[in-house]
Image: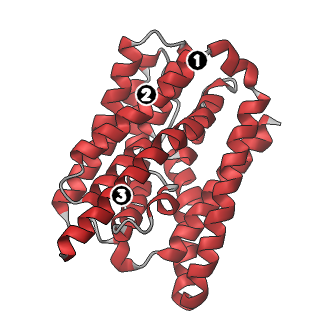
Amino acid sequence: MTPILLLSLKLSVVAILLAIGMLTTRREITYLWQRPKLLMRSLLTMYFLVPLVAILFVTLLPLAPSLKIAVFVLAISAGAPLLPKKLMGLGSDEYVLSLVVTASILAIFTVPAWATALGPLFGRDSQLAPVAVAIVIAQSFLVPLAIGMVFRRFFPAKAEVYADNILTVANLVLTVSALLLLGANWQLIAKAGWPTLFALAGLTLSALTVGHLMGGKEPGERTVLAVSCATRHIGLAILVAAAVPGPKTAVFVAAYIVSSAIVSIPYLKWQSKVNVASEKSSSE
């Protein structure tokens, strides 16, 4: 059952990226590229500061070896195609879409680099070849994105409607698959105990905090970067987890999907109120 659920998780991420392509134009892709300061701050936070937080977690906390590897996997899987559904309407749609596309492209280089650098720290050598990662990212992430963008070019009116429906269904499938994966492997979670869940929630909260502090003064951009740091690239995480023998790492990745949602929802509600208040004060 676990292989089927893992496949379901992967396919849901592919569907989400297809929908993102339907929502994305060339102007939105290049939004960050035309703002070098925001681009560098975003990449520094997502690709350097969050992995450093993960290193502190596994170094200072008495975590089980399998959980340490899961934290490592999540830390290097920067970029989050799950972001648009969470953040659309907060005033930074172009930033969201540009960040997703940019992160997916950079993952070709960053995932193998971090896996090589941090692999020995977690007691294992990296088995991820850069070319293999590039091929998987192209097939699973960049191709559906490109297909979605081509569809939008020829059918702009239908694209947004289809994209919204696909995002709704794909996010539901992703959540249900993660919960079923946890249910099918509940013994692993029960054996690891509450410290595991607290560690995953703590990683989410720490990533949110780092992103929030580095997000700048504009409320919408601050929210996007914070949630980007907390919502890891689940498709990449599953890819990296597949290189680890046994189902434990994949199960902890699924647990992170649930814990990150639980921790992020209150933050999003808070920031939504902040954004509304900011818009009111600026209009007065």
Q: Which amino acid, by three-letter code, is at mark 1?
A: Trp
- Residue visible at 74% across and 24% down in the picture: 186
- Of badges 3 and 2, nearer the viewer stands 3
Q: Which numbered tag is attached to residue 194?
A: 1
- Residue visible at 48% across and 30% down in the picture: 201
**Screen quadrant of the C terminus:** bottom left
User: Callout 3: few (<14), some (14-19), or many (20+) C-alpha neighbours within 10 Å?
Assistant: few
The residue singled out by tag 2 in the image is: 202
Question: Is residue 70 in sight in this rendering?
Answer: yes
Q: Which amino acid, by three-letter code, is at mark 3?
A: Lys
Label total for image: 3
Nearest the viewer among 124 and 145 is 145
- Residue visible at 31% across and 71% down in the picture: 30
Q: Name the N-terminal-most of marks 3 and 2.
A: 2
Measured as percent of width and height from the top left, residue 218 is found at 22, 60
Question: Is residue 34 in sight in this rendering?
Answer: no
Q: Name the N-terminal-most of marks 1 and 3.
A: 1
Nearest the viewer among 21 and 95 is 95
Measured as percent of width and height from the top left, residue 173 is found at 71, 53
Q: CA distance from mark 1 to mark 2?
A: 12 Å
Measured as percent of width and height from the top left, residue 257 is found at 57, 40
Q: CA distance from mark 3 to mark 2?
A: 24 Å
The residue singled out by tag 3 in the image is: 273
Q: Is residue 159 left or right of residue 214?
A: right
Q: Which amino acid, by three-letter code, is at mark 2?
A: Gly
Label 3: which secondary element:
helix
Task: Please tell me whether residue 70 is drawn above or below residue 97 in the rendered image.
Answer: above
Measured as percent of width and height from the top left, residue 200 is found at 50, 28
- Residue occupying the far right of the picture: 1
Give the quadrant of residue 213.
top left
Q: Is residue 194 left or right of residue 271?
A: right
- Residue visible at 61% across and 80% down in the picture: 161
